[in-house]
Amino acid sequence: MSQVTTHVLDAALGRPAAGVPVRLERADGTLVAASATGPDGRVPELGPQSLPVGPYRLVFDTAAYFAAAGTVGFYPRVSIDFDLADGAAHYHVPLLLSPFAYSTYRGS
């Protein structure tokens, strides 16, 4: 399993958000991995099983997701910066999304 995983839930529709392009980057913008959410809204494999400690970023292309759904959204992308402080820990970073709001937390 990847050290960093994510999933996206569409709060407005009350279901997983499938097809959201997601990038994992280092803080300097260097691409680590890219994928898209599956039918269950999850990206279980996003990058290597082990990463060096340091700052990272998940970037969700919400404009592509909303355009595919025929919805106008306010945020064209959501960028979540986080610190990977424990090289042995798993980091799950979910996104709760709607056209005009989003929230996130460190999951398990």
Image (cartoon, rainbow, N blue to C red):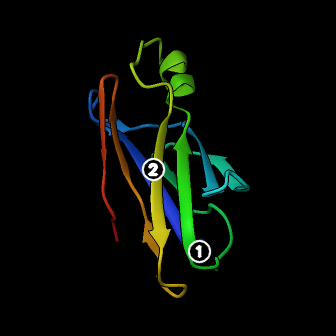
Where is residue 43 drawn, in percent x and y? 55, 54
Nearest to the observer: residue 101 or residue 36: 101
Task: In the displayed orientation, state which residue is furthest to the bottom.
Answer: 88
Residue at horizontal 33%, vertical 65%? Answer: 107
Q: Eyeballing the image, is 16 above or below 6?
A: above
Q: Nearer the viewer, residue 12 or 52?
A: 52
Horizontally, residue 57 falls left or right of residue 106, namely right
The single residue placed furthest to the front in the displayed view is 28
Of the numbered discs 2 and 1, the one sitting upstream in the chain is 1
Q: Position of residue 58 (x, y in %)?
A: 53, 51
Q: Amino acid at mark 2?
A: Ile
For the N terminus, the quadrant is bottom right
Left or right of 85 in this view: 26? right
Which quadrant of the figure has residue 13?
A: top left
Q: CA distance from mark 2 to mark 1?
A: 21 Å
Q: Where does the image place residue 19, in percent across and percent down from the top left?
A: 56, 35
Mark 2 touches mark 1? (CB < 8 Å): no
Q: Position of residue 24 (x, y in %)?
A: 62, 55
Q: Is residue 62 left or right of residue 50?
A: left
Crowd rating for badge 1 (residues with CA inside 10 Å; few <14, some 14–19, many 20+) = few
Up-down relation of residue 70 to residue 103 (above or below): above
Q: Which is nearer the eye, 90 or 1?
A: 90
Location of the C terminus by quadrant is bottom left
| Secondary structure category for the residue under label 1 | loop
For mark 1, what is the residue?
Answer: 1
- Amino acid type of the residue that numbered disc 1 sits on in the rendered structure: Met
Q: Which mark is residue 80?
A: 2
Q: Secondary structure at mark 2?
A: strand
22 up-or-down from 84: above or below: above
Task: Kindly tell me whether residue 72 is visible in this rendering.
Answer: yes
